[in-house]
Amino acid sequence: MNEGGGESQGLFGRIKEKLIRSKRQTAAEGRHITGKTDLAHVRRLPPGQNLVTKWPVLDLGVQPDVPKAEWRLHVTGLVANPVTWSFDDFMALPQSHFKSDIHCVTTWSLYDNRWDGVSARTILDLVQPPVEARHVIFHSYDGYTTNIRREVFEEEDVIIVHSWEGKPLTREHGGPVRAVVPKWYFWKSAKWLSKIEFSDVDKPGFWEQN
Ligand SMILES: Nc1nc2c(c(=O)[nH]1)N[C@H]1C(S)=C(S)[C@@H](COP(=O)(O)O)O[C@H]1N2
Ligand SMILES: [Mo]
């Protein structure tokens, strides 16, 4: 798309283009919020971020309505024990509770979000991916996908959540269940999660391709 040709696009088109461009740039830089080479690990608010007090909603314009009774989470691919959990199965798993900050690449940050759900480490213990499974791909009910490296998924604070601030996660924020990967920009935190796939090959997701 022509960068200088914004006039005829309309406001929405220009905002969308800007958003895609900034994500593309961030993806290209492989920007990691708390990476050892990044200053942000000593600064809670990463450079260029603005603190917000109300949680914004960002998605592809589709917010799938997945009733708890119909929701399933598949954990598949390169694992010793593939599983499919209903919402009740998921709630019966050992539960974890973490507090973390959100940083979105569209420059907002929201501090101290209290999450309840099942930690990535609990899931790893249950499904037992072999060492060759070096990549994890999240799949969502809106067709969104995003990929992370296994060592990112293995971080202690990664959690698959059903509640935020003690209340069930709302549909607009990815309920019934979403991923939360605190040390990375929020686009890695898939909403309306349907599948966690382990793989020996990397599979770029929606923003990673755009
Ligand atoms: N399934 C799905 N997950 C998604 C997205 C999406 O469009 N679909 N957007 C991502 C982006 S870019 C961000 S910033 C966060 C936004 O989450 P929020 O709307 O709860 O703030 O969700 C991420 N996860
Ligand atoms: Mo985002």
Image: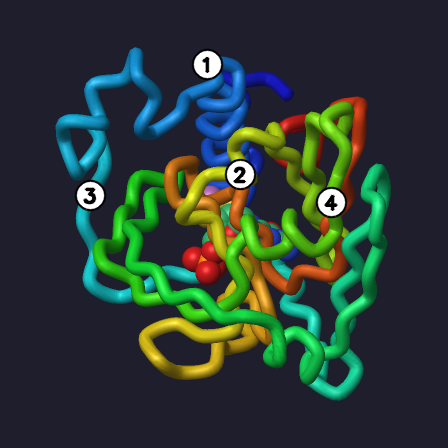
Do tag 2 and tag 1 residues touch (Cβ < 8 Å)? no
Query: Mark 2: which amino acid?
Result: Glu
Element on which disc 3 rests: strand
Category of crowding for the residue at label 1, using alpha-carbon neighbours closer than 10 angstroms: few (below 14), some (14–19), many (at least 20):
few
Q: Point out which mark residue 128 bears.
A: 4
Q: Position of residue 35 (x, y in %)?
A: 34, 21
Please name the residue that numbered disc 1 is placed on: 29
Q: Quadrant of residue 142?
A: bottom right
SS at mark 1?
Answer: helix
Visible in this render: residue 48?
yes
- Please determine whether, in this image, residue 167 is positioned above or below residue 131: below
Q: Amino acid at mark 4?
A: Gln
Amino acid type, label 3 = Asn
Residue at 69 percent across and 30 percent down: it is: 135
| Contact between labelled residues 4 and 2, with CB atoms less than 8 Å apart | no
Q: Is residue 60 visible?
A: no
Between circles 1 and 4, the one closer to the viewer is 4
- Residue at figure coordinates x 35%, y 80% from the top left: 166
- Residue indicated by mark 2: 154
Give the numbered dot on residue 50: 3
Which circle's residue, 4 or 3, is located before the other in the chain? Answer: 3
**Judging from the image, what secondary structure is the residue with disc 2 in?**
loop
At x 69%, y 70%, the residue is 64
Q: CA distance from mark 4 to mark 3?
A: 39 Å
Closer to viewer: mark 2 or mark 4: 4
Q: Residue furthest bottom?
A: 69
